[in-house]
Image (spheres, helix red, strand yellow):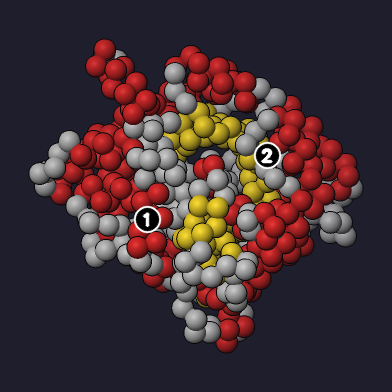
Amino acid sequence: MLNTFDILETIRMIQDECLDIRTITMGISLLDCIDPDIDKACEKVYNKITTKAANLVSVGQQIEKEYGIPIVNKRISVTPIAMLAAACPNDDPVKFALALQRAADTCGVNFIGGYSALVQKGFSAGDLALIKSIPEALSVTTNICSSVNVGSSKSGINMDAVKIMGEVILESAKVTADRQCIGPAKLVVFCNAPEDNPFMAGAFHGPGEPDCVINVGVSGPGVVRAAIAKYPDATIDGIADVIKKTAFKVTRMGQLVGSRASQMLGVPFGIVDLSLAPTPAVGDSVAHILEGIGLEQCGTHGTTAALALLNDAVKKGGVMASSNVGGLSGAFIPVSEDQGMIDAALAGTLCLEKLEAMTAVCSVGLDMIVVPGDITAETISAIIADEAAIGMVNNKTTAVRLIPAIGMQEGDMLEFGGLLGSGPVMPINRKSPAKFISRGGRIPAPMHSIKN
């Protein structure tokens, strides 16, 4: 039951602490759009998306006015397009990307995610063609996001796919070098990718999902940071309780918006993803939460432990607030999108190796990290393999979103603007992993995968 204090507290969170609904994402199945004639399939894709999502943006805007809650993005996720491309193997999958872009323009959404392939155990029909088309697809579109799942705890890691993705990321950066290498900023490589994630660039509508569903992604690093600041002398377990209570309030808001959007759009409500997703805005930083817990700067010793505390407390608070928690849910650490992370990287306190350690205890992985433009494809692949191994062994989602800054070196800044922010070019280990990557094959699943 709401009281006056709860209402005033929520208003303060929105006005002063950067609280928002980061996205309402409509997941749409395209399995009934499969057709051996790619032009017919593309037309079916366009028609279904523009029919199902015709009112998505207007409903989001109406909810914003009704509750006074900012909804930053209205997005769509679709069935992995490789599944549709399998029916027309002799055609160019980029046609699907163009159809998705046309649908995004018609619906007015920020992004459509799902130019994707699931290849954790090998390549099936349509997968290789789609993966190799990713650089072109991301170059000729503006609102399309792509993802590839290369590993899982049940299947192991497809090292052939890992090798190819290193090449794809580098090529994507090269073909968009005139646009701040924006291509790979819209491309995620996963291990254990969730099928109901509403956040870009990794969102896709899994084959086990309903025909159409609404998923909500909430945010609120600023709210958590402000809550911690009120208890400067609390013990660590006391801080965990503060975070849990704050996550509960944030998640309840997401539950409210998701339920209302579901009702207004006439589609089922799926999940609330309660991830703390930072922005470059002042005060909206996960790094600043960690510093509020007691670190002089994010990246110093103790950072991994503080992040583990934060991630766990967010999940515990969220699951008390909603029975529909899903997606990624926890704390994101995208370097270019988090001012505290940017500052720590520029100071040299936060390095790639420390970020990798942090991914073992947080929600995703190496996210929005800018690397030198002369990085080799094999080094990118090796970074993907390391991150996928963390996900596989720990039975959690991990991901890599690296941006090779073509023509730039360590210390330079790549400027994206908006939510993507700006990223310092971070140093990498220059010793070659080429022999390891060239072996191909598959890293077997760990022993704990045998659960039946």
Q: Amino acid at mark 1?
A: Asp
Residue 132 placed where, x, y %? 74, 64
Q: Is residue 161 visible?
A: no
Q: Nearer the viewer, residue 313 or 286?
A: 286
Residue under pointer 1: 343
C-alpha separation, residue under disc 2 versus residue under disc 1: 41 Å
Residue 87 lies, in percent from the top left, at 82, 53
Q: Quadrant of the N terminus?
A: top left
Locate residue 228, reporting x and y percent.
21, 40
Q: Which residue lies under the disc numbered 2?
A: 29
Q: Within 10 Å of the Cα at label 2, are there few (<14), some (14-19), or many (20+) other Cα atoms? A: many
Tell me what residue is drawn at x 55 percent, y 57 percent. 414
Q: Residue at x 27, y 51 (%)?
A: 290
Question: Helix or strand or loop: what does disc 2 sit on?
Answer: loop
Give the quarter of the image for residue 284: top left
Residue 268 to residue 104: above or below: above
Against 253, residue 332 (above or below) is below
Q: Secondary structure at mark 1?
A: helix
